[in-house]
Image (cartoon, helix red, strand yellow):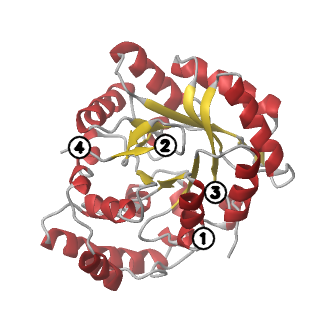
Amino acid sequence: MSFKQVELGRTGIMVPQLAFGAMSFGGMFGPTDEETSHACLDAAIEAGITFWDTANIYGMGVSETVLGHYLAAKKPEGITIATKASIIPGPPRRIDNSYDYLRSELEGSLEKLGLSSVELFYAHRHDPETPIEEVAETMGRLIDEGLIKGYGLSEVAPYTLSRAHAVRPVTAVQNEYSLWTRLPELGLIRSCAELGVSFVAFSPVARGMFGETSVDRADMREGDFRLSNPRFTEPNYSHNLAKVEEFRQWAHGRGVSVAGAALAWVMAQGDHVIPIPGTRTAAHLNEWLDAQKIEMDAATLAEIEAILPAGWAWGDRYGDKQMVAVERYC
C-alpha cells in the first residue's frame, strides 16, 4: 500500500498526500548528522514519501545542503522539492518579500540543492509592508524565468490568499494544522479547496507531542524554542500531556501508532490537505506509515473529537516573539 497521490495545486504535479519536512536536518531540535539524515531519506523513499520540504533558514542552509548531497549521491527519481525564503533572522527578525531578495535567496537554495529549479517556492512569511499583490507578481516572474514551477505562501490569512491568487494562482499555502491547532478550519482550508490550492499542514504531530512517547521538556536542548512556547510551559504542558495520553491510549487500543492516527486525521480533512511531519531519524519516520491504512470514517472522527475537541490545548501555539509576521484573522 502506498500513499494516495494528489495534485500539487493546479500544477499537474502529483505528490503523495503525506510529505516530509526537513527542518530537523538543520539541527533545529537537537544534534544531527548527514549520515543519519540520509538514512531517514532512504526510509522516506522506501515508504513512497517523495515530496520534501526545506527552507533557507533551516540551520542557515544546512538542511538544503544535506538534501543536495543526497540528491547528488543517490539520484532518486520522482522527488518533488519545496523550499522557502523571506525570514531574515535577528535580532530583530525581519521579513523581506522583495524580488531582489527572494531571487537571490532562491539562487542560493538551488545551488545548495544542486538543482536548476524547484517545484515549489514559498514566501516563508508575508511582510505586511509589502502588498501581497507585489509578492504574487514577484513569484510570477520567478515562474516565468523557469526557476520554480509554482509558488506558495505561509502563515497567511484567507483574505491574503485570495488577493494573491487573483494576481497569479497560488500553488500551496503552508500553515500550522494538527489535532491541537485547528485555526485553519475557520476559513483557510475551505478557501484553498475552493481555489484549487494545496493546504500543506506543518507540525501535524504537534511538535513531537503525538509520538509513541511525547516530547519531554527535559530532553530539549538550550535554545529550543519549545522551551518558551506557551503549550510547553507549565501548567499548560502537564494538561496537554494528559490529553495527548488519552489519545495515545485510544490509538493503541486500535492497534495503530499515535503519529499515524494523528496524520490520518489531518489527511481526512480533504484531498488537498497534505501533512508535512518532520523528523531526524528513520525510526520516527516509520511510525507515520500506518497513516495510509487507518480508515477515518464518521464514527472514528467522532471518537477522536470526543477525546480532543477543537480548542482543547492549553496555551497559544506561539509566544508573542514567535508571532512576528504570522497573520491573524479570527
In the rendered structure, find residue 95 and report the number of the disc placed on it: none
Q: Nearer the viewer, residue 316 or 268?
A: 268
How far apart, in angstroms, are the residues tagged by discs 3 and 1?
13 Å
Report which residue position mark 1 lands on. 187
Report which residue position mark 3 lands on. 155
Vertical relation: 88 (above or below) 203: above
Report which residue position mark 4 lands on. 2
How far apart, in angstroms, are the residues tagged by discs 4 and 1?
30 Å
Vertical relation: 225 (above or below) 310: above
How far apart, in angstroms, are the residues tagged by discs 2 and 3?
18 Å
Residue 38 visible somewhere in the drawing? yes
Within-10-Å neighbours for mark 2: few <14, some 14–19, many 20+: many
- Eye-nearest disc, 2 or 3: 2
**Amino acid tagged 3:** Glu
How far apart, in angstroms, are the residues tagged by discs 3 and 4?
29 Å
- What residue is rendered at 35% in x and 64% in y? 268
Q: Nearer the viewer, residue 132 or 254?
A: 132
**Amino acid tagged 2:** Leu
Within-10-Å neighbours for mark 1: few <14, some 14–19, many 20+: some
In the rendered structure, find residue 8 and report the number of the disc placed on it: 2
The answer to which quarter of the image holds residue 50 is top left
From the top left corner, tell me how far across and down residue 238 is, in percent: 40, 78
- What residue is rendered at 70% in x and 68% in y? 328
Residue 211 visible somewhere in the drawing? no
In the structure shown, which secondary structural element does the residue marked by tag 3 occupy? loop
